[in-house]
Image: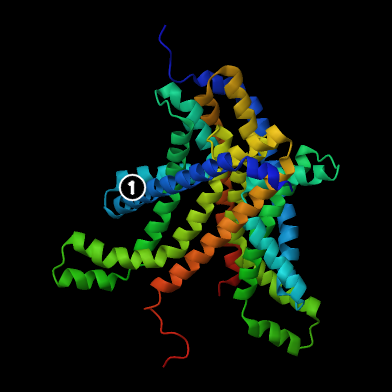
Amino acid sequence: MRRRVMQPQVLLHSLPYMTLAAGMTIYVSLAGIALGAALGFAVCVARLSGNRLLQRGGAFYVSFFRGVPLLVQLLFIYYFLAEFGIDVPAMAAAIGGLGCASGAFQAEILRGALNAVPPGQAEAAIAFGFSRADVWRRILLPQALRISVPPLINEFTLLLKASSLVSVVGIAELTRVSMNIASSTYRPLEAYLGAGLFYLAINLCLAGLGDLAERRLAAGTAR
Amino acid sequence: MSFEVLWRYAPALLSGFGVTILCWSAGAVIGIVVGFAISLIYRLNFAPLRWLLRVYVEIIRGTPFLVQLFLLYSGGPFIGLRLEATTAGILGLGIYSSAYFAEVFRAGFSAVPRGQIEAAQCIGMNPFDILWRISLPVMLVATLPAIVNLLIILSKETVILSIITVPELMYQMQTMAAETFTAFDAIFAMAIFYWLLVEAVSRLGYRLERRVTAYMAPATGAS
């Protein structure tokens, strides 16, 4: 019997599992982005603060988490806490790893965006008697967030792809599930092509969403 | 931290380091050559080919490197492509980075002022000389920061090759960890190693950038 190169029915059979796994991929990525946003904001504030120690700490955080490969970071979190006898659930390690890495990138995105806001605006606000918190809340952040939407969407697509590494710590997301399908059906070609298509589809949706968000936000500034 | 274990495994770790450097450099060379070819074909005004390459670039950039690697390494044999792990790793890195390099070069080419090309045409330079003497130098200087950034990203992606059993540094480190129960030490050493590597490459890139752009702007303070 001639062996057929492609057996699409393998994909058809595994579609329900893949769809569930895609949901897990999206969940892990969203959680990672959210944690990264919180960490990134904190690190960015630390880097812009007047305190030298905080500045150094923020710079160290960014340099470390941007310099160390994500796979190493994921295993690091796993083993680092295990060294102190804390058994980390795989999910926590996965989201923590993605979030820490993303935090470094998001801190830089936010810092770049804050630098792009003309300094005269903050000075004018202070001259008007705005408190420091109000300057941030009403002048700096709204504009910085608007500027950082395109790079943030870009960061999200990068994180979505990076989330494939979470398969290593045993989360049943797209890559892990397609690995399982590949090994149980002996059809790796179909399984990984399917996974690739799912990632591609999610990324295309994200790109579309990004375009939409950009246009909506740009509408506010157009005169 | 047990240095004694690290010392005992030094030969394996060194060979792993060698494989890491080999995969990194060979993958980058393939990526740069293919990416450059793609960016040149973009410039030909031949729409079908351009669309085809556009689709190639979008697919590569829209899917995770790990999935591409699995597809190449375990899906390859089903279409008659039987590769050794290291070869598959190098080829995978090359294909993956070619899409990103193509985009960088494309942006670089569009940064070449039209007037310079028109001037070259006026004095009768042939198209090859225009590319070699006018477009290429300007493009390379403009894209140097992006190229260095891609090389750094690529150096971190080599870690992922350990998942398809390429015997690079991460793989050797994990073998050591499994044989001597020093998982934490191993991953800690890896984190420090890659951090230093990335810092070194980015410093080097920064100095190179300063060097090649030195002619563009006079040093501050000079009249």
Residue B186, percent from left and from top: 68, 44
Residue A197, percent from left and from top: 53, 35
Towards the viewer: A23 or A178: A178
Q: Which residue lies furthest to the left in this view?
A: B124
Amino acid, disc 1: Arg
Towards the viewer: A222 or A75: A75
- For label 1, the SS is helix
* Residue A152 figure quarter: bottom right
Q: Name the residue under label 1.
A: B50
Quadrant placement of the C terminus of chain B: bottom left
Would residue A54 be found to the left or right of residue A2 on screen? right
Q: Is residue A207 visible?
A: yes
Q: Is residue A101 above or below residue B108?
A: above
Residue A206, percent from left and from top: 59, 48
Q: Can residue A74 be seen in this view?
A: no
Q: Which residue lies furthest to the top in this view?
A: A1
Q: Is residue A222 above or below residue B42?
A: below
Towards the viewer: B178 or A121: B178
Q: Is residue A52 above or below residue B19?
A: below
Residue at horizontal 45%, vertical 51%?
B100
Residue at horizontal 59%, vertical 43%?
B10
Task: Using a 10 Å C-alpha cutoff, classify the residue at mark 1 as few (fewer than 14 neighbours), some (14 to 19) or many (20 or more).
Answer: some
For mark 1, name the chain.
B
Residue B183, percent from left and from top: 72, 40
**Which coloring applies here?**
rainbow
Q: Which residue lies furthest to the bottom in this view?
A: B223
Residue at horizontal 55%, vertical 26%?
A191
Residue at horizontal 75%, vertical 59%?
A38
